[in-house]
Image: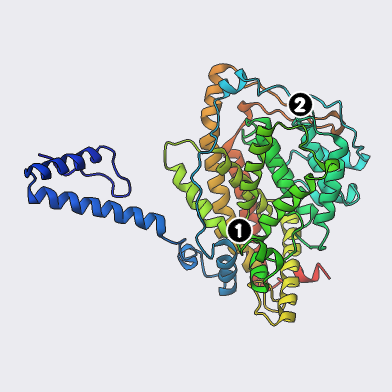
Amino acid sequence: MCEHVSVNSKELDSQYLPELRCLVKQLERGEASVVDLKKNLEYAASVLESLYFEETRPIEDPEEELNDIKSDLVPSQVRDWLALTFTRQRDLMRRSEDKPRFRSIVHAVQAGIFVERRNSNTAVLSYPPEVITVFKNVNKWSFDVFTLNEASGDHALKFVFYELLIRYDLVNHFKIPVSAFISFVDALEMGYSKYKNAYHNLMHAADVTQTIHYLLLNTGMQWLTELEIFAIIFAAAIHDFQHTGTTNNFHVQTRSDIAMLYNDRAVQENHHVSAAYRLLQDDEMNIFCNLSKDDWRELRTLVVEMVLATDMSCHFQQIKTMKSLLQTPEEIDKPKALSLMLHTADISHPAKCWELHHRWTAFLLEEFFTQGDKEAELGLPFSPLCDRKSTTVPQSQIGFIDFIVDPTFTVMTEMIEKIVTPLIEEASRSGLTGFRRSSVKSTGSEANCSLNAVDFKSFRDMWNQETHRNKELWKAKAIKGTDTDIQLSLT
């Protein structure tokens, strides 16, 4: 006679299915006992109920997600901002298609993926001497993109983007026409400058792109295929293209054209990708013209997923999903890993040195205040942190660091360690740890990318120290009541 099988109620044990079929046969023969029948029916009901709950439950209430935040230095307006910005307003449909996994290093080498990066013979973009000097620090965490922008005549994105395409030998590998690249990036920079945003402009795009380079270079994540490296660098460069300087919620509330176009979902993120790809429809700007159809499709799939994941309302679900994956023996698929890396780079300035972080904060708050001015003109209530007269700057950054930045960096670091550690071990067994990537000679900078040089503890300590130092400086400003320096620095 069948016995009740005890399994986790959140997943239907495959061994239990034969037991149910056995019970059906016993019922047909009139041999099943009422006790066994009751136990099995109760169990099946509990499994179905649990599955239904998992599939239909909404994203957690923002208050539930925010209930751990310290309240001593974080007022209600900051909580409102966190809730509005970093949580979804509705559950979105989930995709279930299979994702590519991180491949074995040995297999990758056998496939000819890991070739030493060469100095490109096709480099034709002329570097001003001042730019070459600035690029000597391009491998550093707190790279000063503001200095680069000044040295390049307001073309920080053009030079960072091009420099990385050369460093990773992507121009040669994908036969990117440099004339098409220059036309494309000129149009890209024009799009970033369209609304004259204080924060979401070409300097922010350049900063995020350089941050991705640092993560690739110093965490072992350079062990990606050329196509995947190309995808994340390209995604970083375009991730805020034609940003309007206002939030998605502002677009929804004002019923803007793009809110109508994208049905209030990831409004700007959808636009960033779509508008950037529309540029590529022009043959003179098509930097993908020599990609195979398969490569084009794979790259586009990765780019779309990465950029859409920069929608801040996806934040908590993205972090929760990755935490869950870290608790399992399963491999982490590349799209999720690359998406978290880009999201982390997008919010990374509080983990940089104080001078850079303070300056970025000033620009971000000015952009918020500009939106608040528009809301006042339209008779709309102020969005959190958008009222020039009442916003508490230090508290907003303390809350941002405590509840968004530190947890994100923690999860990303744990994710990278889980992905890269087995690759390091395999590379060590295979004698591949001395692999180097060459960089373009014109910058006078070359980095050793040996897997032996990967140091997760140093990386964790670095961003941890920076966020802690920045938070303490904000606390000091909050105590002294000197938060008006943000506004004054922009006048």
Relative height, residue 270 to residue 480 (above, below): above
Quadrant location of the C terminus? bottom right
In the image shown, does 192 or 408 lie closer to the viewer?
192
Within the image, what quadrant is residue 225 found in?
top right
Residue 84: x, y in percent?
A: 58, 67
Residue 379 visible here: yes
In the image shown, does 479 or 210 lie closer to the viewer?
210
Quadrant location of the N terminus? top left
In the image shown, does 382 or 392 lie closer to the viewer?
382
Residue 142 visible here: no
Relative height, residue 483 to residue 42 (above, below): below
Residue 330: x, y in percent?
A: 44, 36
Q: For this view, does 327 lie left or right of residue 230?
A: left
What residue occupies the far bottom of the structure in this picture? Answer: 379
What residue occupies the far front of the structure in this picture? Answer: 28
Q: Nearer the viewer, mark 1 or mark 2?
A: 1
Identify the residue at image location x=14%, y=53%: 38
Identify the residue at image location x=76%, y=37%: 288
**What is the distance, in whole Å, between disc 1 and disc 2 at their CAs?**
35 Å
Tell me the crowding category of disc 2: few under 14, some 14 to 19, or many 20 or more residues within 10 angstroms, Cα based: some
SS at badge 1: helix
Residue 312: mark: 1
Indicate which disc, 1 or 2, sits on the residue closer to the N terminus. 1
Q: Amino acid at mark 1?
A: Met
Residue 21: x, y in percent?
A: 20, 40
Q: For this view, does 93 lie left or right of residue 221?
A: left
SS at badge 2: loop
Tell me the crowding category of disc 1: few under 14, some 14 to 19, or many 20 or more residues within 10 angstroms, Cα based: many
Residue 438: mark: 2
Identify the residue at image location x=51%, y=48%: 95
